[in-house]
Amino acid sequence: MRFFIYFCITFFIFTGCSFKDVSSPFIVLKYEQKADILPNAPTLSQDEIKNFKNNFLEKYFAAWDTNSLWASKQDASFGFQFLKNKNRYVAENRIEVDDDWIENIKNLSNFDEYGSVLEHAITTKNTNLRLLPTDKPLFKASNTSFDYPFDTIQNSFINIMQPITISHYSTDFAWAFVESSIASGWIKSNELAIVDKELIQKIKKAPKVVIIKDNAPIYYKEGLFAHYLKAGSILPAYKYENGQYSAFIVDTQKDGNGFTANITINKEFARPFPLRFDSFNVKKTVNELLNENYGWGGLYNNRDCSALTRDFFSIFGIWLPRNSRAQKNAALYFDISKLTAAQKEEKLKELAQPYLTLVYMPGHIMLYVGENEEGRALVMHNIWGLTNSKGEKFLIGKSIISDLYIGENLPNMEKKNLLMSKIQGFTVFAPKPALAKIKLLKTYQDAIEKIADNIVYFKDGSEIVFDDQIQKSYEQMLENPDILDQFYEPYTKGALNSVNRNDAGRIRNEEFFKTVYGRDKQKIEQNLIEVSWLPSTVNKTYLFNKNNGAAKALQAVSNELDKLDETYFEFLQSPSGTYNYRNIADTNRLSMHAFAIAIDLDTQYANYWLWDRKTKKTYKNSFPQEIVDIFEKHGFIWGGKWQHYDTMHFEYRPELL
């Protein structure tokens, strides 16, 4: 499975998160390790908080919403790679593992039964996900007696009350191979409980609290100690009084089935989920997560780099997958790998949002926390250490605040060894105004010079107000929108039954499109080029606007559609058109066809709200999802997802995707 395979592979290739020689000197940190030195957090709207929370809960419970496994048998048995290369690994006594041990683990793993159980379950305590069904470690054989013991079998740490699906059991039934929403692996079978539909619904529907401090003690109603919890853990709750939350966990009966046990949590350790995203809570959370010892894959109940970012975001109801590579793709990613170190920092400070941006390099992930008075970008991250150009190690071994030039004054530390040189990109989760600016700058970089002081500055010298600060009704936004209004509703990619139809994309600032595609008919027509439509089958040409990659994107769509089997061609062989300098029906607003950035497919399969209103028809769609997916992949939105639907209409709007 990709999200745990990559996590394991990074052990062998990453030089930022983990190092071997604990006899190496520790790095003296430059900055005071307190959130007081950091800037304030941006503000999230109630809609944004709601959307983040809903997405989080959907992903959190994903293991219970399927009756199958995501990973193939080959991916799931990835841990066997250690057994195939036994001479590379040693046991805890530094002696190579023998053939009997290997054969026993293979038999114990019982992968002939992969996928045979498929029962929904839940973790009943904090536990480790292992790549093999054993608590025994495997260390790299090349390590010396002074090396730090990174256990290569450790996959991940998961919290109590984590929804999981059981694939199968080890031959002795002591271990279960499970899938959670963040990773797969082996956990002890006495650390899970089977859950039925009734219990699943009880957990799903209950209000939630989130743990905001590490080592938070919870107690059974009778007063007995139950567990210590990590910050970021989520529990179902049902009452708050006298400074305590009443919640419940799941324990295991003798038959393996789960039952609920009532517990209490002091308000010092928990808050309603999600915690409000504001400067006070953000900085308090930063302070809570700082100075924690580094823990490879969650070993010793400590976090590594991606566990730190995941738990920080979880507290505020923002979902992240488990490993660094998956996390970088969790939101809008900016590739800056080809920039110089100085350009990377400038781009980061220009577009990143403090506490809502992840900074990525292969095998390591960091939380951007703003810039300091010296103008340096700062990050919070859990890191093992740095290596200089001679291979010498300098240790950190905990979660810290640093800039991306940390270690620059160490002996033989060249620029190429610094984090700033190694970072490849950053991923932004941002409030709507900030995200709108970021998407505009990313998708219209040929046209937009910058966005500053509420003004969009274009490369042709023109300027447009970004946000006119006027409260408008939906109809007023349709007739007189500012640029920010264009982002009023989110567009969701994917199958139609997975989204609620809205009108994302129908609000358009005409002055914006005139500036980027042509101010009048003559200017627009100067920007038109031919696109070959399904060249090996239909072989027609259509005019499309070359600006901002629109024609290039339509050609990419055409080439991909051309590879579909013949059952799709009836929908594709007779598009009704692209460029047509006209207004939208019954309005004074220019159509996107006037700018030559839209294409309508065959009208005989189309449903259009204005047509259907006259004949009292309701929404219907005939176009296959495979066609929609290809258009969306290349930056087109589909009118079939509109409340005021137009199912034949595809419009180039990459800023909305």
Image (spheres, rainbow, N blue to C red):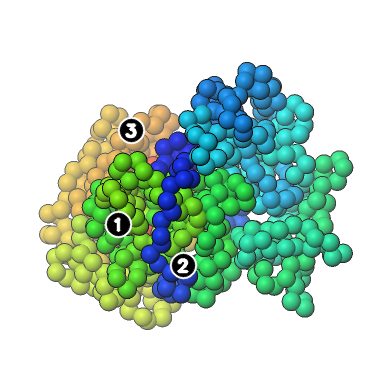
Q: To which quarter of the image does residue 208 belong?
A: bottom right
**CA–CA distance in space, label 1 to label 2:** 19 Å
Q: Is residue 259 left or right of residue 534?
A: right
Q: Secondary structure at mark 3?
A: loop
Name the residue rendered at 32%, 53% in the picture.
Answer: 410
Residue linked to disc 2: 33
Q: To which quarter of the image does residue 150 belong?
A: top right
- Which one is in front, 129 or 591? 129
Query: What label does residue 562 carry, if any?
Result: 3
Mark 1 or mark 3: name the one nearer the start of the chain: 1
Mark 2 or mark 3: name the one nearer the start of the chain: 2
Q: Residues within 10 Å of mark 2 (few under 14, many from 20)?
A: some
Look at discs 1 and 2 and give the one toward the viewer. 1
| Three-letter code for the amino acid on which mark 2 is drawn | Gln
Q: Is residue 374 left or right of residue 120?
A: left
Image quadrant where one finds the N terminus: top right
Res. 637 visible in picture:
no
Image quadrant where one finds the C terminus: bottom left
Q: Secondary structure at mark 2?
A: loop
Residue linked to disc 1: 409
Q: Secondary structure at mark 1?
A: loop
In the image, residue 117 sits, relative to residue 522, either above or below, namely above
Look at discs 1 and 3 and give the one toward the viewer. 1
- Which one is in front, 637 or 280? 280
- Which one is in front, 380 or 618? 380
In the image, residue 371 sits, relative to residue 445, either above or below, namely below
Q: Residues within 10 Å of mark 3 (few under 14, many from 20)?
A: many
- Which one is in front, 204 or 552? 204
